[in-house]
Protein backbone atom coordinates (compact mmCIF):
# COMPACT_ATOMS: atom_id res chain seq x y z
CA UNK A 1 0.00 0.00 0.00
CA UNK A 2 1.28 3.49 -0.87
CA UNK A 3 2.23 5.95 1.88
CA UNK A 4 -0.50 8.48 0.95
CA UNK A 5 -3.15 5.73 1.13
CA UNK A 6 -2.06 5.03 4.70
CA UNK A 7 -2.51 8.74 5.45
CA UNK A 8 -6.08 8.65 4.12
CA UNK A 9 -7.02 5.60 6.17
CA UNK A 10 -5.45 6.96 9.35
CA UNK A 11 -7.28 10.28 8.94
CA UNK A 12 -10.68 8.67 8.41
CA UNK A 13 -10.18 6.25 11.35
CA UNK A 14 -9.28 9.22 13.53
CA UNK A 15 -12.49 11.03 12.53
CA UNK A 16 -14.61 7.93 13.06
CA UNK A 17 -13.37 7.52 16.63
CA UNK A 18 -14.31 11.14 17.39
CA UNK A 19 -17.69 11.39 15.65
CA UNK A 20 -19.43 13.35 18.47
CA UNK A 21 -16.59 15.62 19.55
CA UNK A 22 -16.75 19.42 19.27
CA UNK A 23 -13.39 21.12 18.70
CA UNK A 24 -12.43 24.57 20.00
CA UNK A 25 -9.86 26.69 18.17
CA UNK A 26 -9.07 30.28 19.22
CA UNK A 27 -12.38 30.70 20.98
CA UNK A 28 -14.53 29.47 18.04
CA UNK A 29 -16.40 26.16 17.85
CA UNK A 30 -15.78 23.98 14.83
CA UNK A 31 -18.28 21.15 14.27
CA UNK A 32 -17.19 17.77 12.97
CA UNK A 33 -18.68 18.50 9.52
CA UNK A 34 -16.55 21.63 9.19
CA UNK A 35 -13.48 19.73 10.32
CA UNK A 36 -14.30 17.08 7.71
CA UNK A 37 -14.09 19.74 5.02
CA UNK A 38 -10.65 20.83 6.25
CA UNK A 39 -9.40 17.23 6.32
CA UNK A 40 -10.85 16.68 2.85
CA UNK A 41 -8.96 19.70 1.49
CA UNK A 42 -5.72 18.50 3.13
CA UNK A 43 -6.09 15.00 1.68
CA UNK A 44 -6.98 16.44 -1.71
CA UNK A 45 -3.77 18.46 -1.60
CA UNK A 46 -1.75 15.38 -0.66
CA UNK A 47 -3.24 13.37 -3.51
CA UNK A 48 -2.47 16.22 -5.94
CA UNK A 49 1.17 16.30 -4.77
CA UNK A 50 1.40 12.52 -5.23
CA UNK A 51 -0.14 12.76 -8.71
CA UNK A 52 2.36 15.46 -9.74
CA UNK A 53 5.22 13.33 -8.36
CA UNK A 54 4.07 10.27 -10.30
CA UNK A 55 3.61 12.35 -13.46
CA UNK A 56 7.15 13.74 -13.10
CA UNK A 57 8.61 10.24 -12.68
CA UNK A 58 6.66 9.01 -15.71
CA UNK A 59 7.91 11.97 -17.75
CA UNK A 60 11.53 11.31 -16.70
CA UNK A 61 11.14 7.64 -17.64
CA UNK A 62 9.71 8.55 -21.04
CA UNK A 63 12.63 10.92 -21.72
CA UNK A 64 15.24 8.25 -20.93
CA UNK A 65 16.88 5.76 -23.34
CA UNK A 66 15.74 7.65 -26.44
CA UNK A 67 16.74 6.81 -30.04
CA UNK A 68 16.64 8.67 -33.30
CA UNK A 69 16.89 7.27 -36.83
CA UNK A 70 19.55 8.64 -39.20
CA UNK A 71 19.18 9.08 -42.97
CA UNK A 72 21.13 5.82 -43.36
CA UNK A 73 18.71 3.95 -41.13
CA UNK A 74 20.97 3.71 -38.06
CA UNK A 75 19.30 3.91 -34.64
CA UNK A 76 21.48 6.17 -32.50
CA UNK A 77 21.23 6.83 -28.77
CA UNK A 78 20.49 10.37 -27.67
CA UNK A 79 19.97 12.08 -24.30
CA UNK A 80 20.20 10.36 -20.92
CA UNK A 81 20.61 6.56 -20.88
CA UNK A 82 20.67 3.89 -18.20
CA UNK A 83 22.12 0.43 -18.70
CA UNK A 84 21.15 -2.10 -16.07
CA UNK A 85 23.54 -4.78 -14.84
CA UNK A 86 24.60 -6.94 -17.79
CA UNK A 87 26.64 -10.13 -18.16
CA UNK A 88 29.73 -8.46 -16.66
CA UNK A 89 27.73 -7.29 -13.64
CA UNK A 90 28.27 -3.62 -14.56
CA UNK A 91 25.59 -0.91 -14.74
CA UNK A 92 26.12 2.55 -16.20
CA UNK A 93 24.36 5.82 -16.92
CA UNK A 94 25.13 9.09 -18.68
CA UNK A 95 24.38 11.13 -21.78
CA UNK A 96 24.63 10.39 -25.49
CA UNK A 97 24.98 12.86 -28.36
CA UNK A 98 24.43 11.45 -31.87
CA UNK A 99 25.24 7.94 -30.67
CA UNK A 100 28.43 8.88 -28.79
CA UNK A 101 28.91 9.00 -25.03
CA UNK A 102 29.58 12.53 -23.86
CA UNK A 103 30.65 14.06 -20.55
CA UNK A 104 30.69 12.12 -17.31
CA UNK A 105 29.34 8.58 -17.07
CA UNK A 106 28.93 6.54 -13.91
CA UNK A 107 29.85 2.85 -13.99
CA UNK A 108 29.10 0.69 -10.99
CA UNK A 109 28.99 -2.86 -9.68
CA UNK A 110 27.78 -4.12 -6.32
CA UNK A 111 31.25 -3.34 -4.89
CA UNK A 112 32.64 -0.43 -6.90
CA UNK A 113 31.72 2.85 -8.58
CA UNK A 114 33.79 4.76 -11.15
CA UNK A 115 33.18 8.00 -13.06
CA UNK A 116 34.48 8.11 -16.64
CA UNK A 117 34.62 11.28 -18.73
CA UNK A 118 34.22 10.47 -22.43
CA UNK A 119 35.78 12.28 -25.39
CA UNK A 120 35.10 11.75 -29.10
CA UNK A 121 38.10 10.89 -31.30
CA UNK A 122 37.81 11.78 -34.98
CA UNK A 123 40.24 11.12 -37.84
CA UNK A 124 39.38 11.02 -41.53
CA UNK A 125 36.13 8.99 -41.78
CA UNK A 126 36.59 7.34 -38.37
CA UNK A 127 34.94 8.38 -35.10
CA UNK A 128 34.82 6.64 -31.73
CA UNK A 129 34.73 7.29 -27.98
CA UNK A 130 37.94 7.43 -25.93
CA UNK A 131 38.09 7.91 -22.13
CA UNK A 132 39.62 11.20 -21.02
CA UNK A 133 42.31 9.43 -18.98
CA UNK A 134 43.90 8.10 -22.19
CA UNK A 135 46.78 10.46 -23.01
CA UNK A 136 47.04 10.41 -26.81
CA UNK A 137 50.36 10.97 -28.59
CA UNK A 138 51.11 11.77 -32.23
CA UNK A 139 51.62 8.64 -34.29
CA UNK A 140 52.18 7.57 -37.90
CA UNK A 141 50.63 4.75 -39.92
CA UNK A 142 49.67 2.01 -39.27
CA UNK A 143 48.84 3.55 -35.88
CA UNK A 144 45.56 5.48 -35.93
CA UNK A 145 46.02 6.50 -32.31
CA UNK A 146 48.04 5.48 -29.29
CA UNK A 147 47.46 6.61 -25.73
CA UNK A 148 49.01 5.81 -22.39
CA UNK A 149 46.64 4.70 -19.60
CA UNK A 150 46.80 7.15 -16.69
CA UNK A 151 50.51 7.88 -17.30
CA UNK A 152 51.62 4.36 -16.41
CA UNK A 153 54.46 2.51 -18.13
CA UNK A 154 54.74 1.26 -21.74
CA UNK A 155 52.64 -1.85 -21.08
CA UNK A 156 49.55 0.22 -20.17
CA UNK A 157 47.92 1.68 -23.27
CA UNK A 158 44.97 1.89 -25.64
CA UNK A 159 45.73 1.82 -29.35
CA UNK A 160 44.10 1.40 -32.75
CA UNK A 161 46.03 0.06 -35.74
CA UNK A 162 44.82 -0.26 -39.34
CA UNK A 163 46.22 -2.24 -42.28
CA UNK A 164 45.16 -2.60 -45.89
CA UNK A 165 45.10 -6.39 -46.26
CA UNK A 166 45.93 -6.14 -49.96
CA UNK A 167 49.02 -4.05 -49.27
CA UNK A 168 50.32 -6.41 -46.56
CA UNK A 169 49.18 -9.51 -48.49
CA UNK A 170 47.55 -11.04 -45.43
CA UNK A 171 44.23 -12.02 -43.84
CA UNK A 172 42.68 -11.87 -40.37
CA UNK A 173 43.91 -15.39 -39.61
CA UNK A 174 47.38 -14.56 -40.91
CA UNK A 175 47.49 -11.38 -38.82
CA UNK A 176 46.40 -13.24 -35.69
CA UNK A 177 49.03 -15.93 -36.28
CA UNK A 178 51.83 -13.37 -36.67
CA UNK A 179 50.64 -11.42 -33.61
CA UNK A 180 50.50 -14.48 -31.36
CA UNK A 181 53.79 -15.80 -32.76
CA UNK A 182 55.59 -12.53 -31.98
CA UNK A 183 54.37 -12.70 -28.38
CA UNK A 184 55.12 -16.39 -27.86
CA UNK A 185 58.67 -16.03 -29.19
CA UNK A 186 59.40 -12.77 -27.35
CA UNK A 187 62.57 -12.75 -25.24
CA UNK A 188 61.21 -9.96 -23.05
CA UNK A 189 57.82 -11.35 -21.94
CA UNK A 190 56.45 -14.82 -21.38
CA UNK A 191 52.95 -15.74 -22.56
CA UNK A 192 51.27 -17.41 -19.58
CA UNK A 193 47.93 -17.96 -21.30
CA UNK A 194 46.16 -17.07 -24.55
CA UNK A 195 42.54 -17.16 -25.68
CA UNK A 196 41.19 -16.44 -29.15
CA UNK A 197 37.45 -16.08 -29.76
CA UNK A 198 35.36 -15.13 -32.77
CA UNK A 199 32.12 -13.20 -32.30
CA UNK A 200 29.72 -13.15 -35.22
CA UNK A 201 27.53 -10.07 -35.38
CA UNK A 202 24.82 -9.37 -37.94
CA UNK A 203 27.18 -7.86 -40.52
CA UNK A 204 30.59 -8.29 -38.96
CA UNK A 205 33.00 -10.85 -37.51
CA UNK A 206 35.08 -9.67 -34.55
CA UNK A 207 38.04 -11.65 -33.23
CA UNK A 208 39.18 -11.19 -29.64
CA UNK A 209 42.73 -12.11 -28.66
CA UNK A 210 43.33 -12.15 -24.91
CA UNK A 211 46.88 -12.70 -23.69
CA UNK A 212 48.23 -12.90 -20.16
CA UNK A 213 51.94 -11.99 -20.16
CA UNK A 214 54.70 -11.83 -17.62
CA UNK A 215 57.69 -9.52 -17.76
CA UNK A 216 58.88 -7.58 -14.75
CA UNK A 217 55.14 -7.57 -13.86
CA UNK A 218 52.10 -9.44 -15.07
CA UNK A 219 49.78 -7.70 -17.52
CA UNK A 220 46.99 -8.47 -19.96
CA UNK A 221 46.61 -7.43 -23.58
CA UNK A 222 43.13 -7.65 -25.10
CA UNK A 223 42.64 -7.03 -28.82
CA UNK A 224 39.51 -6.73 -30.94
CA UNK A 225 40.36 -7.40 -34.59
CA UNK A 226 37.94 -7.00 -37.51
CA UNK A 227 37.88 -6.13 -41.20
CA UNK A 228 35.81 -3.45 -42.97
CA UNK A 229 36.17 -2.89 -46.72
CA UNK A 230 39.42 -4.91 -46.73
CA UNK A 231 40.94 -2.71 -43.99
CA UNK A 232 41.93 -4.62 -40.86
CA UNK A 233 41.46 -2.77 -37.55
CA UNK A 234 43.19 -3.83 -34.34
CA UNK A 235 41.86 -2.16 -31.18
CA UNK A 236 44.03 -3.17 -28.21
CA UNK A 237 43.87 -2.42 -24.50
CA UNK A 238 46.79 -3.42 -22.27
CA UNK A 239 47.23 -2.91 -18.53
CA UNK A 240 48.65 -4.50 -15.40
CA UNK A 241 46.65 -7.62 -14.55
CA UNK A 242 45.94 -6.51 -10.99
CA UNK A 243 44.54 -3.19 -12.24
CA UNK A 244 41.99 -4.61 -14.68
CA UNK A 245 38.51 -5.08 -13.24
CA UNK A 246 34.99 -5.56 -14.59
CA UNK A 247 34.44 -1.83 -15.06
CA UNK A 248 37.67 -1.46 -17.09
CA UNK A 249 36.55 -4.26 -19.41
CA UNK A 250 33.10 -2.69 -19.77
CA UNK A 251 34.67 0.67 -20.65
CA UNK A 252 36.89 -1.02 -23.26
CA UNK A 253 33.82 -2.71 -24.78
CA UNK A 254 32.12 0.69 -24.95
CA UNK A 255 35.09 2.00 -26.97
CA UNK A 256 34.58 -0.83 -29.47
CA UNK A 257 30.81 -0.36 -29.66
CA UNK A 258 31.21 3.37 -30.39
CA UNK A 259 33.14 2.63 -33.62
CA UNK A 260 31.71 4.64 -36.54
CA UNK A 261 33.17 4.59 -40.03
CA UNK A 262 32.07 6.84 -42.91
CA UNK A 263 29.07 7.88 -40.78
CA UNK A 264 28.03 4.23 -40.52
CA UNK A 265 27.46 2.97 -36.98
CA UNK A 266 29.00 -0.54 -36.94
CA UNK A 267 27.42 -1.48 -33.63
CA UNK A 268 24.08 0.29 -33.64
CA UNK A 269 21.57 -0.50 -30.91
CA UNK A 270 20.24 -3.43 -32.96
CA UNK A 271 23.70 -4.88 -33.71
CA UNK A 272 25.37 -4.90 -30.29
CA UNK A 273 24.48 -8.50 -29.50
CA UNK A 274 26.56 -11.12 -31.26
CA UNK A 275 24.80 -14.06 -32.85
CA UNK A 276 27.52 -16.65 -32.29
CA UNK A 277 30.64 -17.17 -30.16
CA UNK A 278 33.43 -19.57 -31.13
CA UNK A 279 36.80 -20.57 -29.71
CA UNK A 280 39.62 -20.31 -32.24
CA UNK A 281 42.75 -22.46 -31.87
CA UNK A 282 46.05 -21.02 -33.11
CA UNK A 283 49.04 -23.21 -32.38
CA UNK A 284 52.41 -21.47 -32.53
CA UNK A 285 55.63 -23.52 -32.48
CA UNK A 286 58.07 -21.87 -30.08
CA UNK A 287 61.55 -21.14 -31.43
CA UNK A 288 64.56 -22.00 -29.28
Image (tube, rainbow, N blue to C red):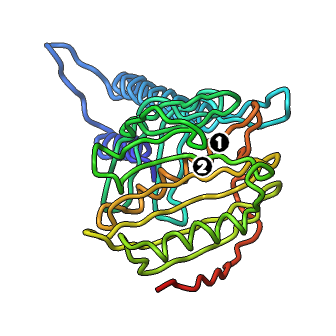
Q: Residue at x 37, y 58 (%)?
A: 239
Label 2, on which residue? 256
Q: Is residue 63 left or right of residue 243?
A: right
Establish if 252 lies above or below 282: above
| Vertical comparison of 281 with 93: above or below | below
Dot 1 alpha-carbon crowd within 10 angstroms: few under 14, some 14 to 19, many 20 or more: many
> Dot 2, how many residues are within 10 Å of its Cα: few (below 14), some (14-19), or many (20+)?
some
**How many numbered circles are shown?**
2
- Distance from disc 2 to disc 1, alpha carbons, whole Å, reads 6 Å
In the depicted structure, whether residue 115 falls above or below residue 241: above
Of all residues shown, which one is farthest toward the top?
Answer: 27
> In the figure, is residue 194 to the left or right of 62?
left
Q: Residue 25, percent across and down?
A: 18, 18
Q: Residue at x 59, y 37 (%)?
A: 128
Which residue: 66% across, 33% down?
126
Determine the image quadrant of residue 192.
bottom left
Front one among 72 and 4: 72
Viewed as shown, does residue 21 lie left or right of 286?
A: left
Mark 2–mark 1 contact, CB under 8 Å? Answer: yes
Say whether residue 148 is left or right of residue 127.
Answer: left
Mark 1, secondary structure of its residue: loop
The local secondary structure at tag 2 comes to: helix
From the top left corner, tell me how far across and down residue 87 is, in percent: 54, 66
User: Which residue is label 1 attached to?
Assistant: 259
User: Is residue 174 depicted above or below 54 in this figure?
Assistant: below
Number of the label disc, if any, that sits on residue 228: none
Residue 86: quarter of image: bottom right
Residue 43 point in image, percent of width and height:
41, 30
Question: Residue lying furthest left in this view?
Answer: 27
Residue 276 is situated, as x and y percent measured from the top left of the image, at: 75, 71
* 139 and 91: which is toward the camera: 139
Amino acid sequence: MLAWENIYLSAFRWLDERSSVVYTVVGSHFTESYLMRIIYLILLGLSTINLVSCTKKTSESQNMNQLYITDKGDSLETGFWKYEMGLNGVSSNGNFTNGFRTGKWTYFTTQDTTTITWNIFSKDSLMLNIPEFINLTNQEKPTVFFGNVRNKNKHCYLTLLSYDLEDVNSSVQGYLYQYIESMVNSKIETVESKEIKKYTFKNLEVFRAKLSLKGTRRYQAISYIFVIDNILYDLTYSDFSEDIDKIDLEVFNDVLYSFELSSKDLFSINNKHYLKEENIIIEIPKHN
